[in-house]
Amino acid sequence: MKNIELLVLDMAGTTIDEDNVVYKTLTNAVNDYGYEVSLDKVLSTCAGMEKLEAITSLLREINGNEEDAPAIFENFSSQLKESYRNLEVKPINGTEDFLLKMKAKNKKIVLNTGYTSEIAHQLLNKLNWMENIHFDALITADDVLESRPSPEMIHLAMKKFNITEADKVLKAGDSVIDVEEGKNAGCGLTIAVLSGAQSRTELEKAEPDYILKTISEAENIL
């Protein structure tokens, strides 16, 4: 089996269960502007993307006005802060255990996300996940110029821990964009999980090495 030294794991839907509140909020924010999009449409178009970019692509797909995107994004961001304030956030089944086991095996864990740093920290605080205990670093959309599926976040994660060979990196996520990000970085393993935004049928299009129910099943592979 490949010698994996670094795990780059997506947050919402992969390690954290926040009940798709991001995509529900995004759907509301778009519809507040007089559009009519369904949650399913938002999940299939926007999953895993940096959120302003996600809103712009969505508007393009529904022949909306792309110039509405920044205002919708502002609306979305303030609604999301409010939603998260009241939301009960849980780790996806088995995740916390999995992270601690991987850390005990001296593997580095980087959480990466298309969220802003502020929202990502809000989630981690709710879970009481600590740097150096549950994970080694957090990389968000704020830390890079190009968002997923660009491999920039993974390259940054590798640089942080002096890992030069991408085949020692595992990337896992719940969207096609996560898998594409891993492939673009040349990761040794790409894993899609069914605990989040997209279905097996959608995820199969990206051809990940494995499709698992939850990330904790990756223990058997590692």
Image (cartoon, rainbow, N blue to C red):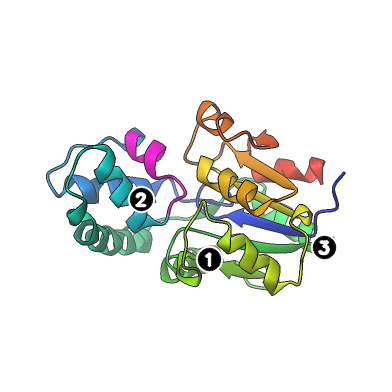
Q: Mark 1 sits on what residue?
A: 124
210 relative to 58 in the view: left or right: right
Look at label 1 and name its amino acid.
Leu
**Could you give the CA–CA distance between mark 3 and mark 1, rounded to whole angstroms?**
20 Å
Residue 88 in the image: x percent, y percent? 44, 55
Under circle 2, the secondary element is helix
- The mark found on residue 113 in the picture is none
Under circle 3, the secondary element is helix
Residue 124 in the image: x percent, y percent? 53, 66
Q: Is residue 206 above or below residue 118?
A: above
Whether the residues at callouts 3 and 2 have beta carbons within 8 Å, the answer is no
Look at label 3 and name its amino acid.
Ala
163 relative to 136 in the view: left or right: right
Whether the residues at callouts 2 and 1 have beta carbons within 8 Å, the answer is no
Under circle 1, the secondary element is helix
Task: Please tell me how crowded label 2 is: few (under 14), some (14-19), or many (20+) other residues with Cα within 10 Å.
Answer: many
Point out the image quarter for the N terminus.
top right
Q: Which residues are magenta?
A: 41-49
Name which residue lies at 67% across and 47% down: 94
Residue 61 in the image: x percent, y percent? 28, 38
**Could you give the CA–CA distance between mark 2 and mark 1, rounded to whole angstroms?**
23 Å
Residue 199 in the image: x percent, y percent? 51, 31
Tell which circle, 3 or 1, labels the residue nearer the N-terminal end: 3
Whether the magenta-drawn stretch holds residue 44 is answered as yes
- The mark found on residue 104 in the picture is 3
Q: Is residue 121 above or below residue 91?
A: below
Look at label 2 and name its amino acid.
Ala
Please name which of the two marks, 3 or 2, marks the residue nearer to the observer.
Answer: 2
Q: Mark 2 sits on what residue?
A: 54
